[in-house]
Image (cartoon, grey):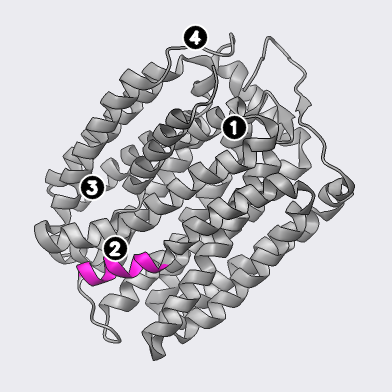
Amino acid sequence: MALSRALVRLLALTCGVTIANIYYAQPLVHGIAHDLGTADSSAGALVTATQLGYAAGLLLVVPLGDIIARRPLLTTLLTIDAVALAATAVAPGLALLSVLAVVIGLSSVVVQMLIPYAATLAAPHQRAGIIGTLMGALLLGILLSRTFAGVVAGLAGWRGVYAVAAGLMAVTAIVVGRVLPAEAREVGIGYLAQMRAVVRLARSEPVLRRRSLVGAAQFAAFSCFWTTVTFLLSGRSFGYTQTEIGLFALVGAAGASCVLVGGRLLDRHRNLAWQVTGAALVLMLASFGVLAAGTYGLVWLVVGALLMDACSQAVHVTNQAVLYDLVDGARSRITTVYMTVYFVGGALGTTTGTAAYGRWGWGGACAAAAGFCVLAVLAWWAARRHERPAASGVTEPRAEVARGGAGSG
């Protein structure tokens, strides 16, 4: 079937609404901690639990997209997401909230099934642009989730945020179940054979391994900032309310337009992907120097966040554009490897940032994030001998050699 504009819009909307679920907790950490009578660091573990659940879903659930018909699989996951969100709205304590956070993360991997689905249907000369469209929706979902959470929490408390989110996911599940085309499974193999194919792909593709490390380190820095800035804004320096903290997240929304423009530019200049990645990583590292001055005024946080968000998403879209061009017929497997490592990095960034802020304050959190950026630059540089030879021309994805009945991914 053709990838129509209407279907692209539906996929983008589903991505944005679903990805928001794993970020609602970030601006709500202080309010949840106060309501439950626990420390901010304890409540901050909910963010880590959600990201770890998402990473587990990427590793264990995303491969099902090839061996189970998509429509019933996606509808089931969206329904589980809605139920977990509704349960979170009435959960009595931190222990149950942590379990539900893992379930929310696990079921939200729907978005990482939709992106390779769109990339597979797209023509090669449109692939980066369509990835950019869906990634723009993802970025808006991530950033606006914080604004949405802050505003709704100001009106109805943090539980109200999850109640509204549950309703949104229920509607999304119904629409996807009715609109997404009914198709048979793509690959006639079992789950264990599919997982073995994922491992083989990771072993055989050095670019996949190195780009995964770049993505993980970049997302660690991103998560480190967006988790700890909540502590800074709610603390003595600013004293912001949950609503005001949510509104601050709007400063990063400009990054979505960068993703859309960047995806289209990559379609025309695919031979510059390695150079673009390096430039974005260096600028992202510099952004944390600006952000470190955030205690002296809001303008430093605004400028730094704009630069950091734009560079972070530029790296992410470029990574995916490069990886989806590696092997034709293995994009779900590529997503499994890349995004699992990516979100493990995010969880590490959240944990490290929270610990650094607790011990050294805002400067320590920025230093930790900058350290992750340095790791990303090193991983990018290590990939140069595998990617730079391609700068003289663009190659089409290689066809994967089927083993043990493995087909397209």
Pick whichever of labels 3 and 4 is earlier in the sequence: 3
Residue stretch rendered in magenta on the structure: 242-251
Pick whichever of labels 4 and 1 is earlier in the sequence: 1
Q: Amino acid at mark 1?
A: Ala
Q: Nearer the viewer, mark 2 or mark 4?
A: 4
Q: Amino acid at mark 3?
A: Leu
Task: Check residue 344 for magenta coloring.
Answer: no
Quarter of the figure with residue 244 = bottom left
Query: Is the residue marked by circle 4 packed among few (<14), some (14-19), or many (20+) residues within 10 Å?
Result: few
Find residue 27 and name its label: 2
Point 53% across, 26% down: residue: 3
Q: Amino acid at mark 2?
A: Pro
Pick whichever of labels 3 and 1 is earlier in the sequence: 3
Image x and y of residue 105, in percent: 37, 41
- Which residue corresponds to mark 3? 97
- Which residue corresponds to mark 1? 119
Image x and y of residue 126, in percent: 64, 36
Secondary structure found at label 1: helix
